[in-house]
Amino acid sequence: MIKGINSSAQALLGTLMTWGLTAAGSAVVFFMPKAQPTVLDSSLGFAAGVMIAASYWSLLAPAIELANESGSYGSSGQYSFIPVAVGFLLGALFVYGADILVTKFGIGSLQESHVHGKNLDKEKDTFVINNKQNDVNLSYGNRLTGVNESHIALDFSELKQRNIDRATKIDTNKPPTLSHSNQRWKRIFLMIVAITGLAVGVGFGAVGKSTTATFNKAKNLAIGIGIQNFPEGMAVSLPLRGWGQLSGMVEPIAGFFGAVAVQLCEPLLPYALSFAAGAMIFVVVDDIIPESHSRSNGRLASFWCVFGFIVMMVLDVALG
């Protein structure tokens, strides 16, 4: 990031830096061969805090000021909330739609219920429970899923009567295991890097357009996202073994095109900044926080979220 050069080049440099930190975090996989749930959830909590703080100080605040200064939303800017609210909503809807498409094309969904030794098939409403002695295929109510030599169709009342649950240890409240969450991690990480890359690009594209949209603000946003990306890259690469830093390449691409789009459509800046903020908040609430609370480390993730928020706030306020 070099002050005075073209905004698109700034965005590219900024997002290359954030990708580099993602790659550095991914390299930790060589020193920590085993995925640690506490590390994963702490990293997600920290990322959530950074993104929440960045969405306001680096994106929403400049968007509101730009709308005020434009003079297009009331004589005193009393309607400046309109472009910000519209952009914020569109950002959330964009992520929601992208989430549906990503899930449809097989990258995975947070709603997949994989729990210790069994898969929940939503279409068939069936549990398949694996143990060393046999496979028991369960159905709800009176629906049977078929019987053969290795699969016995039972309903829950029969299962209780025969005490099979003692052998199979059914517990539908157990959190997802790490071995079954790779698809979820791919999906979450792709969403995070794409949206944060877009946010950095839009931030640099808006530099100089208002008193709050400064180079330092954009730089601090890139630094904050980069700080977040180091543990994030580590968290993703632990379960995915090296996939993290490669997928991080989405970030420079999103950042570059975000900056170019903002420069070409300057009147849309309030919409673009709030769009990035809405997308980030939706990813945090819909993906990051639920995932960080899925392995009994919710309180730890919450404290890391607070810490991440403070780090990003300090960067924006003290260094902005």
Image (cartoon, rainbow, N blue to C red):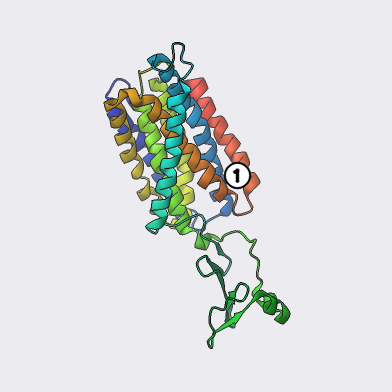
In the rendered image, the quadrant that contains the N terminus is: top left
Residue drawn at the location 51% of the way across and 41% of the way down: 284
Q: Residue furthest bottom?
A: 149
Q: Picture coordinates of residue 31 (x, y %)? A: 47, 53
Q: Is residue 211 above or below residue 22?
A: above
Residue drawn at the location 46% of the way across and 39% of the way down: 92
In the figure, residue 15 lies in which quadrant?
Answer: top left
Asked whether, in this view, residue 189 is left or right of residue 168, the answer is left
Q: Is residue 249 above or below residue 133?
A: above
Q: Say if residue 190 shows up in the picture.
A: no
Q: Is residue 6 above or below residue 117?
A: above
Tell which of 21 and 285 is nearer to you. 285
Q: Residue furthest top?
A: 75
In the figure, residue 118 lies in which quadrant?
Answer: bottom right
Q: Picture coordinates of residue 268 (x, y %)? A: 34, 26
Q: Picture coordinates of residue 176 (x, y %)? A: 57, 60
Q: Is residue 209 above or below residue 36?
A: above
How many numbered callouts?
1
Look at the numbered disc 1 and give the secondary structure of its residue: helix
Q: Picture coordinates of residue 112 (x, y %)? A: 51, 60
Asked whether, in this view, residue 231 is left or right of residue 161, the answer is left
Residue matched to label 1: 301
Say what amino acid the circle numbered 1 marks: Ala
Q: Say if residue 286 shows up in the picture.
A: yes
Asked whether, in this view, residue 313 is left or right of residue 252, the answer is right
Q: Residues within 10 Å of mark 1 (few under 14, many from 20)?
A: many
